[in-house]
Amino acid sequence: MAYAMHAPNRPPVPVETLLLAYRSGIFPMADRREDQEVFWVEPRERAVIPLDGLHVSRSLRKVIRADRFRVTVDRAFEQVIRACAEPRPEHPETWISERIVQSYIGMHRAGHAHSVECWMPDEAGDSQLVGGLYGVSFDRVFCGESMFSRLPDTSKVALAWLVAVLGHAGYALLDCQFMTEHLRSMGAVDLPQSEYRRMVERAQGQPRLSLGMAWRWFAEGYAAGVVAGAGAGAGAGGAAADGAAEGRAEGSALGEAGPSSPGKRIMQSLTKTS
């Protein structure tokens, strides 16, 4: 009887290795979904979105202000990364292998990988995940990895929320890795790798707020007792433990959210910084 020989599954890339790579300006990819090997990429140029320079079209502003989608942070990290890995007509193959997925789930559990989700209520009253993005954070840097849309505008809405949340939390750099026309239309610029490395060095230190706390200001307002990423553990950016107490302690940084809707708060923030 013949037996098929399969290579043993490779373990996830350790969190410490990934963080060292990102701080050095490199990141992992795989050739195919089934590939168990990863290769390390150091682009000659990086696509960066200035946190004070996001371009939001008039139609997208209307979508955001109307709160057409409910936006969360770190509520469904694994769902988001697996959605990003799904084949698409324009990209039938993916660089997000199962080893990549497991490696970034480990980063999420360690508090260094985050997701932004867009939800749409369905007829049964439940919410369906219709778009989002994920990326890696360290110091005051966020490296966007991938995004997906199941409905028009959902990845753009997630990106707009991310930029507003990063700015409110005190981040300094949003790296998008490779330039695309989609990113360029939203304000991304190309930088030489050497300049990107200098920006990473200047962005050392801790942001003034966790991503969860910054999301909570936009989504619920300062006085609301809702915590980002409930049930997500350490991956919730540190907001899952003591939401009310942390909110009181950081009240001076958060300020009063006021009566406006989440989408209006997002657009007010982006208008102030652009």
Image: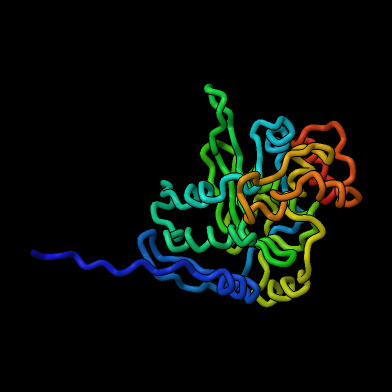
Apparent side of residue 246 relative to residue 231 in the rendered image (left or right): right
Apparent side of residue 39 relative to residue 125 in the rendered image (left or right): left
Apparent side of residue 233 relative to residue 172 in the rendered image (left or right): left
| Residue pictured at 86% horizontal, 47% vertical | 248
Quadrant housing residue 48: bottom right
Q: Outermost residue toward the right? A: 252
Give the percent coordinates (x, y) of residue 83: 48, 47
Quadrant housing residue 99: bottom left
Residues 70 and 198: in front is 70
Quadrant housing residue 46: bottom right
Give the percent coordinates (x, y) of residue 184: 64, 55
Apparent side of residue 92 relative to residue 216 in the rendered image (left or right): left
What colour scheme has been applied to the protein in the rendered image?
rainbow
Q: Outermost residue toward the top? A: 123
Give the percent coordinates (x, y) of residue 247: 82, 47
Residues 191 and 157: in front is 157
Q: Quadrant of the N terminus?
A: bottom left
Residues 79 and 199: in front is 79
The answer to whether residue 72 is seen in the rendering is: yes
The answer to whether residue 164 is seen in the rendering is: no
| Residue pictured at 66% horizontal, 40% vertical | 71
| Residue pictured at 47% horizontal, 67% vertical | 12
| Residue pictured at 87% horizontal, 51% vertical | 249
Give the percent coordinates (x, y) of residue 172: 77, 63
Q: How many marks?
A: 0
